[in-house]
Image (tube, grey):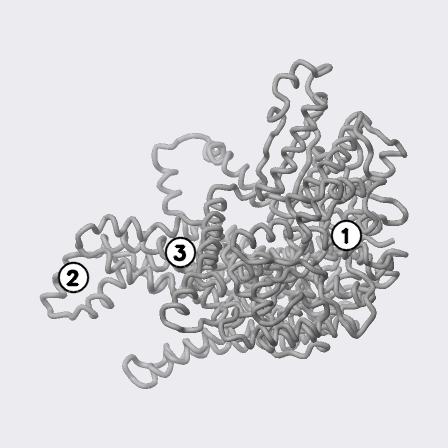
Amino acid sequence: MLILGLIVAAFLGPIFVWWKSEKPSLPRYGIASAAAVFGAAVTPIGMGQCAFAEETSGVDHLLAWALMAGGAWLALIVTQSVFDRRDGKRTGGGGVAGEIRTGGYRMGWWVPWLLLSPTLIILAVFLYTPAIQTFTLSSKLTRLGAPRSKDVCFGNFSELLITDPVRLVAYPLLAIGFIYAARLWVKRSTPDTWSRRGADVTSVVAMLSAFVAFYAMFSAGGAGQVAYRPVYLNTVIISVGIVVFGMVGGLGIAYLAFRQIKGGGVYRTLLIWPYAISPAVAGLLFFMIFDPTAGIFTYTMENWFGIDVPNYRESAILAQMAIILASSWKIIGYNILFYLAGLQTVSVDQVEASLIDGASARQRFTKIVLPALSPITFFLLVTNLTYAFFEVYGTIDFMTKGAPAGKTSVAIYEIIRVGVNNGDLGRGAAQSVLLFLAVIGVTLWQFRTSGERVSYGGS
Amino acid sequence: MKYRLMVLAAAIALVAAACGGGADATTTTVADAGGGDTTATDAPSGDPIEIDFWVAFSDEKRLGFAQDRAAEFNAAHPEYNVKVTSFASYNDVFDAAVLAVDSGQPPALIHFFEAATRQALDAVDSSGNKIFKSVTEAIGGRTEILGEPVVLDNVVSAARDYYTVDGSFYSMPWNTSSTVLLSNMDILNAAGVTKPPETWGEVTAACEKVMAMTDGPSGCISWPNHSWFAEQSLGQQGELLANNDNGRSGRATEVFLNSKGMIDYVTWWKDLADKGYYTYTGQQRDWGGVDSAYLAGELAMMIDSSSDTVIHTDEATDLGFELKASFMPRNENVPYVGNLIGGATIWMLDGMDTKKEDGALAFMNFFSNPKNAAAWHQLTGYVPITEDAVALLNAEGWYDEAPNAKVASDQLAAAANTPASLGALIGNFVGIRDILTLAIEDILVNDVDVATRLGQANEEANKSLSEYEALFGN
C-alpha cells in the first residue's frame, strides 16, 4: 500500500511540472519525480508506517495517503519555485522585497534575519514547538502523569470519520465536481438570461454542498466511533450565526452611528464597549439575563407581561440562539469600529454624483457604500470567523456547558472538554489539528472566492 | 421578589470578582499575616522552609480558612512558611502539580478530590516514580510531629475507609461531605406535608401536593445533574458501580452504568421531571443554578452536598423560611445499605527531604486538629473529620443549636461498611462521570429510553476505562 502511494507520487511529479512549468525538460521531470517521492515518504517514515500495519482500516490508509499527497505537493511547490528562480521568473510577493534590495539597505543578507530573530525565537518557542507537539500528540493515546503512552497512528482521527473508505472519498469528490460543474455553467452562460440565474443559484447550492459533504464524512457515533457529526453541525450553525449576526448588525449600527447626530462621539464610544469584555464575562452577563430562575429577562416577561419563558438550555434552537446572540454581541463592537473607519473612506464625490443621477438611498448603499467597504468586510469575515471558531469557549461554558445534551458543544468546546477536562491529550490534540485544518481551509477558500470581489480602489 | 434581587446582587458581585480576578492561579503569601516580628527573630538559621500548599478553592470562606490556618501555623513554627496558592478547580491543581514535578518545582501538598483517588495513586513523573507518598507511611507511627499531635488515626471511619487503598491511608482528608435533602418547611407545611420525605415514593407524593397548590413554587425539587448523586443512590441500593468490589479488592476494569439500581434511579428521576416536579436547570454540574432556584423560593426541596448545609441554613434564616436537613431520599423497594462520602483530601508529594516533609506532615495534622476541624465544620457544613472534633462539638452544644449540621454525619454513621457504600475507585473516573451526566441530560431533556441510553453510556465508559487501564494498569 505504501509502495503504491510512492509510485503514484513518482508519476505525479512530472505531471505537475508539465502542467506548471514553462520549460519542462527531461532532467526536470526526473528531479520533480524524486522530490514528489521524497515528500510523500517523509510522513510514513516519520510515523513508522503505522498506517499500513496489520489491523488497519481503509480509512487509515486513506488518511495516510492524504498526508503523503500533502507532502508530495509541498515538495513539488518548492521544486517548482526553484525552477522558476532558475528561469529568472519571480513568483509573486517580490514587489516590496525587490524595492528594498535595490534601495538604500545595502547590508549583509543576515541583517534582516538578525532584526527578525527576537520575533522568530518567540514564535519558535511559543507557537511552532507547541504546534508540532500537538501533531505528535494527536497520534497517541496518552494522559498526564501516565507511566506510558500508546501509539494509535491515525486512530484519533479515523474514529471521528465514517468507517466506509469509499464513501469517505466519494462525498468530497462529488462536492468538488458539483462546484466545478456549476462554475463551468456560469462561464458558459450569458449574463441576464435565465440560464445565468439558474447557474448562479446552482453555484451557491454547490458551495453549500461542501458543508453537506463534510457532514456526511463525520461519524454519527456508535460502534466505537466518536459522534463528531453533531459537533460539526453545531460548529457550522453557531459560527455562521455569529458571523452573520455580528457583521450585519455591526454594519447596520455603524451606518446609523456614522451620520451626523448630536453626541455621536459618545454613542460611538459606547458601542465599542462590548469588545473590551472577555468572553467569559459576556457569557455570565447573558446567563444573568436569560437564566430561567433568576434572569432579568425571564423575570420581566413573567411578571410584567405574563409570558412564561421556556428554559433556553432545554431547547437546542434556543440554546444555540442564545450562544449566537451573546457571542455576536461581544464581537459587534469590533465590527462597528472597523466599519466606522471604513465609512470614512467612502468617496463623498461618488455619493454626490449618484445623488445627482437620482440614485435611491438603497441603491447608494448597495452600489457604492458596500463595494467601497469590501476590503473591510473581507478582513472582518476572516477575523470574525476565527473568533467564532476559537473564542467562544468561555461564553458557552457559562451559558450552557454544551447543553442540551451537547447541542451547543462546538469544536473548540469539545477540544477543551476532551483534552483538558477529561485529560485525554491525544484525542484533544487530534481534534485541535482538525480545527486547525478547518481554519486554514476556510481562510484559503475565502481568499480564493472573496478575493475576486474585493475592491481596494484604484484599478 | 426580595430573594431574586439577592440572587442578582450575588451574581453581580460575581461579575465584579470575575473582572477583577486573574485567569489562573492567584498566589497569596500569608507568611507575615500572623507571624509579624517573631518570624524574623525566632528563625533558627536562614530563611524558613517553604511549604507550598495548592488549594482548589477560590471563595473567600474556604480559601480564607486555609490561609488563616497557614498563618497560624507559620506563627507557631517560624522555621516553616506554608504558602497557600489558589486554583480554579481540582483538575487544574493536579495538572499543575504533575507539570511542576517534571519542571523540578513541585508543591509540598495539594488538595485533590475523591473521585480522582485512583488517578492520584497512579500518577508518575517522567522518570516513572510515583508522584505522591502515603501519609501513613510518612508518619511512620509517630504520635506527634514538631509538637503537633497526629490526628490521622482519629479520622471518622467513613472517610478513613474511603481513602484507604490496599491497606494504606494515603492522603489526609480535609473537606468531606455527604448528600442531604434540604426542605423548605414553609412550603411543605403549606402543602400539607409535615415532615421531609424519606423515600422516592414519599418525594413523588409530597411533590404532588406541592404542585397542586395554586400559589405554590414553580417547581418542587431539584439537585445538580452531577454523577455523585447517582453514585450515592447506588450505594443506598447496595449496588456496585465497578467490578472487583468497586475497585477496592483489585483494579476496576469494568463499570456498570446500566445496572438495575442505576436504571431505577434515573427512571424515577425522569418521571419526576416529566411530571414537572423536578426542575432541571439545564446544565450539568450546576450547583449554583439549583442553589439560586431554591433560595429564590422556586423549589420546595433540593438535594445538596452537606458542604453547604450550615451556609444554606443561615441564608434561609436571613430570607425568613425554615430549612430542615434530612437524609437523602432512598429507594423504598430495596433494603438501605449506605450513603458515601464526597469531598477532597490533601496529598503529599514524594521526594522531599525529612525536615520539609515533617513540616508538611505537622501542618496537615495541625490543619485538622480538633479545634480546626470543628471550626471548618461550623463554617461550612462539611462533616467534622475526626472523632475528637465531633466530641468537641458535642461538648460545646453545637448540635443542639444547629441540628441540620449533624445530618450528614448521622447518615454516614448509619451506612453499612460494604464496597457498595464505600464508593468506587475507578481510573478516568472524571471522564466516566461526564459520560453519565451527559446521558442523564439527554434522558431528562429529550425523549429517549432510559435503559437504551444508559447502555450506550456504559459502552462508552467501558471503552474509556479500558484505555485508561492500557496506560496505567499492571
x 67%, y 24%: residue: B75
The answer for which chain carries disc 1 is A
Mark found first going from the N terminus, 2 or 1:
1
How packed mark 3 is, by other alpha carbons closer than 10 Å (few <14, some 14-19, many 20 or more), is many
The answer for which chain carries disc 3 is A
Distance in Å between CA atoms under marks 2 and 3: 29 Å
Callout in the foreground (2, 3)? 3
Q: Please give the residue where the numbered disc 1 appears in the rendered image.
A: A149
At label 3, the amino acid type is Ile
- Horizontal side of residue A356 vs A429, given as left or right: left
- Horizontal side of residue A92 vs A120, given as left or right: left
Along the viewing direction, whichever of A7 and B154 lies nearer the viewer? B154
x 62%, y 42%: residue: B62
- Horizontal side of residue B405 vs B351, given as left or right: left
How packed mark 1 is, by other alpha carbons closer than 10 Å (few <14, some 14-19, many 20 or more), is some
Vertical arrangement, residue A306 with respect to residue A266, above or below: below
Secondary element at image label 2: helix
How packed mark 2 is, by other alpha carbons closer than 10 Å (few <14, some 14-19, many 20 or more), is some
At label 2, the amino acid type is Val
Q: Are marks 2 and 1 on the same chain?
A: yes
What label sits on residue A351 in the rendered view? 2
Image quadrant assignment for residue B106? top right
Q: Please give the residue where the numbered disc 3 appears in the rendered image.
A: A331
- Horizontal side of residue A205 vs B362, given as left or right: left
The answer for which chain carries disc 2 is A
